[in-house]
Image (cartoon, helix red, strand yellow):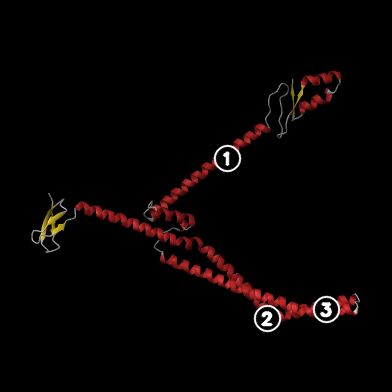
């Protein structure tokens, strides 16, 4: 039987305990000393190791969850930022044009309008009241054009402010994504798995303890993809077989020659068939001569057939 050496925590004396004893009384101070069983030590070590693996998997799942946004939306955010920057450039050019050339454009436009009004008035020999009315309209065109230009300038400045704010927001998102990616560089995730479907799958399997590390989670995702591909191919085969059955059924309804007493019964293009009595047409041929026309027509027609 194995004897274990135990130190009394109260007086420091060395005590002896048998292998399976869990408690021993100190002979010197009378204290009751708890002795941990070697089996319990191994069990506790195993439990601690398993818990450490689970905690590591949970931490890895949290890291993967943090990376879903940066990896899956980085390019989309960068494209949005580029679009807002283009709008900033366009609005800035419009503002510069209105501020630097606005007065010149107003004068040219209003002068051209007044000249056209004058030409119309003279060419049509308008009366003095109408001429004065045309002149008043020409004069009023100046404040009208100025109002339009000022409105466009105000709109351009408003668009510039909105575009600048949105571009700043998208830029902040990119900086935050870069910070998160830099903080999680220890996460060994291959680029082909940096999509939303794969990362959510890996995260969920780590959280559900179906996988305890990245390698297991990736292997399970690859198995999932293979199963989905097999299901897709099976469904494709089923659809193809169904389509072939439908085509065959359609051909049987619209293009099949059915046996009949005389020459067969013909079906063409889904058109309903019409039957004719052979005995009746023979009588018409013998007594009226009408069968000379109807008998060859019905025999050759695709949508007619003979019966007795």
Residue 34: give x, y in percent of width and height: 17, 57
Disc number for residue 263: none
Q: Which residue occupies 72% across, 77% down?
A: 147
| Residue in the foreground of this view, choosing between 99 and 20 | 20
Residue 308: give x, y in percent of width and height: 74, 20
Q: Left or right of 260: which side holds 241?
A: left
| Residue in the foreground of this view, choosing between 18 and 25 | 25
Residue 201's place in the image compared with 280, above or below, is below
Mark closer to the chain start, 2 or 3: 2
Mark closer to the chain start, 2 or 1: 2
Q: Give the residue at mark 2.
A: 100
Classed neighbour count for the residue bearing mark 2: other residues with Cα under 10 Å, few (<14), some (14–19), many (≥20) = few
Classed neighbour count for the residue bearing mark 1: other residues with Cα under 10 Å, few (<14), some (14–19), many (≥20) = few
Label 2 to label 3, Cα distance in Å?
Answer: 25 Å
Disc 2 and disc 1 in contact, CB within 8 angstroms: no
Label 2 to label 1, Cα distance in Å?
Answer: 68 Å
Q: Secondary structure at mark 2?
A: helix
Q: Secondary structure at mark 3?
A: helix
Q: Secondary structure at mark 1?
A: helix
Q: Which residue occupies 86% across, 80% down?
A: 132
Q: Left or right of 222: which side holds 249?
A: right
Q: Which residue occupies 57% across, 73% down?
A: 164
| Residue in the foreground of this view, choosing between 22 and 49 | 22
Disc 3 and disc 1 in contact, CB within 8 angstroms: no
Label 3 to label 1, Cα distance in Å?
Answer: 74 Å
Q: Give the residue at mark 3.
A: 115
């Amino acid at each position: 039987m194995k004897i274990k050496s135990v130190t009394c925590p109260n007086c420091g004396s060395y005590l002896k305990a048998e292998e399976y004893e869990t408690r021993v009384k100190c002979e010197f101070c009378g204290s009751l000393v708890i002795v941990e069983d070697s089996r319990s030590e191994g069990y506790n070590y195993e439990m601690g190791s398993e818990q450490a693996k689970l905690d590591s998997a949970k931490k890895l799942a949290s890291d993967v969850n943090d990376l879903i946004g940066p990896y899956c939306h980085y390019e989309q955010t960068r494209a949005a930022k580029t679009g807002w920057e283009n709008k900033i450039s366009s609005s800035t050019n419009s503002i510069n044009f209105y501020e630097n050339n606005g007065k010149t454009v107003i004068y040219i436009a209003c002068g051209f309008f007044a000249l056209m009004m004058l030409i119309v008035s003279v060419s049509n020999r308008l009366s003095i009241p109408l001429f004065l009315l045309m002149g008043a309209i020409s004069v009023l065109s100046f404040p009208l054009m100025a109002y339009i230009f000022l409105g466009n300038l105000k709109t351009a400045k408003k668009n510039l402010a909105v575009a600048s704010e949105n571009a700043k927001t998208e830029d902040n998102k990119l900086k935050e994504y870069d910070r998160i990616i830099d903080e999680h560089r220890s996460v060994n995730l291959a680029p082909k798995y940096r999509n939303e479907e794969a990362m959510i799958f890996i995260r969920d399997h780590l959280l559900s303890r179906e996988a305890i590390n990245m390698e297991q989670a990736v292997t399970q995702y690859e198995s999932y993809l293979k199963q989905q591909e097999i299901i897709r191919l099976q469904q494709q085969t089923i659809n193809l077989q169904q389509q072939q059955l439908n085509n065959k059924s359609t051909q049987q309804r619209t293009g099949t020659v059915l046996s009949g007493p005389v020459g067969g019964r013909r079906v063409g293009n889904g058109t309903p068939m019409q039957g004719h009595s052979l005995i009746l047409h023979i009588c018409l041929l013998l007594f009226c001569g009408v069968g000379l026309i109807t008998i060859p027509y019905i025999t050759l027609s695709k949508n007619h057939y003979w019966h007795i």
